[in-house]
Structures are given as C-alpha cells and as structure tokens.
Image (spheres, rainbow, N blue to C red):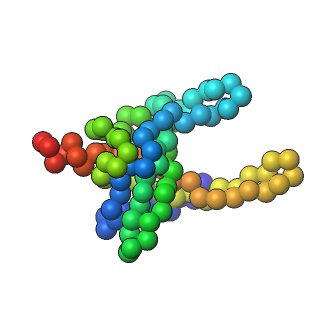
C-alpha cells in the first residue's frame, strides 16, 4: 500500500481527544492490533496547526508508541507520521479518504518537566 511521509517538524500539534482503543469490528467490539508487532492500536485526535491553518487529524498509533499523559490541550511531538489513501465500497456506495498513522505520540509537557 502506498504511504506518504508527513513532515510535522514546523507544525504545532496538541491533543484534541485523548487516545482510545481502535475498534476493528464494531459488531464484536474486537480491538485492532498491529499486524507486524501484535501491539494494540489506539486512535488519538490531534489539532495540527501549520501556516495559520488548523486541522483535526485522527491518528492511529501503537499503544507502545504513546508516552506521557495525553489529555486535551497537551502539546505533543509526532514521530514517523505517514498518510495512506484508502477506498472501499459498501452497499454499492464508494467511499475514499486519507488515514494517518504515527509511530509515536509524545507529550511535550512531560519532556519540559524533566
């Protein structure tokens, strides 16, 4: 699958919604896991501000890549962000979009306190 690296070095990023487990199957409640490592996958919404434009991104992150207390408004650093275009068809309707995944989301508040 095609992956597009995302440069976050000049962006201001903060938590919009804290991490929650990513659900693989809504009917059974099965939690998604990373295919390579088996780690539980989490989703976190972040506010991504760059060039005076703000966007809310929903990131998928392995639970092992989340560090520090990530409450609403916490400034964070993102590591290894990639964008992946997706497309599917359900009940005859085509849908498409872009999903975002990060290797790690790290609280900058915890780093500043240390």
Residue that appears at 74% across and 56% down: 95
Residue that appears at 34% across and 49% down: 73
Residue sticking out furthest to the front = 72
Residue that appears at 46% across and 31% down: 39
Percent position (x, y) of residue 50? 38, 69
Percent position (x, y) of residue 89? 79, 51
Residue that appears at 38% across and 49% down: 15
Percent position (x, y) of residue 107? 28, 45
Residue sticking out furthest to the bottom = 51
46 horizontally vs 69: left or right: right
| Count of numbered tags | 0
Q: Is residue 33 visible?
A: yes
> If the image is split into quadrants, where does the N terminus sit?
bottom right
Residue sticking out furthest to the left = 114
Q: Is residue 49 above or below residue 101?
A: below
Residue 22, quarter of the rendered image = top right
Q: Is residue 76 visible?
A: no
13 horizontally vs 45: left or right: left
89 horizontally vs 84: left or right: right
> If the image is split into quadrants, where does the C terminus sit?
top left
Percent position (x, y) of residue 112? 16, 48
Residue 81, quarter of the rendered image = bottom left
């Amino acid at each position: 699958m095609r992956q597009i690296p995302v440069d976050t070095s000049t962006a201001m990023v903060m938590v919009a919604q804290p991490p929650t487990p990513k659900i693989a199957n809504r009917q059974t409640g099965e939690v998604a896991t990373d295919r390579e490592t088996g780690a539980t996958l989490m989703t976190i919404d972040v506010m991504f501000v760059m060039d005076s434009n703000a966007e809310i991104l929903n990131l998928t992150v392995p639970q092992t890549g989340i560090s520090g207390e990530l409450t609403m408004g916490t400034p964070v650093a993102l590591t290894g962000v990639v964008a992946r275009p997706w497309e599917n068809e359900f009940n005859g309707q085509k849908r498409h979009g872009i999903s975002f995944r990060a290797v790690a989301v790290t609280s900058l508040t915890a780093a500043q306190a240390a």
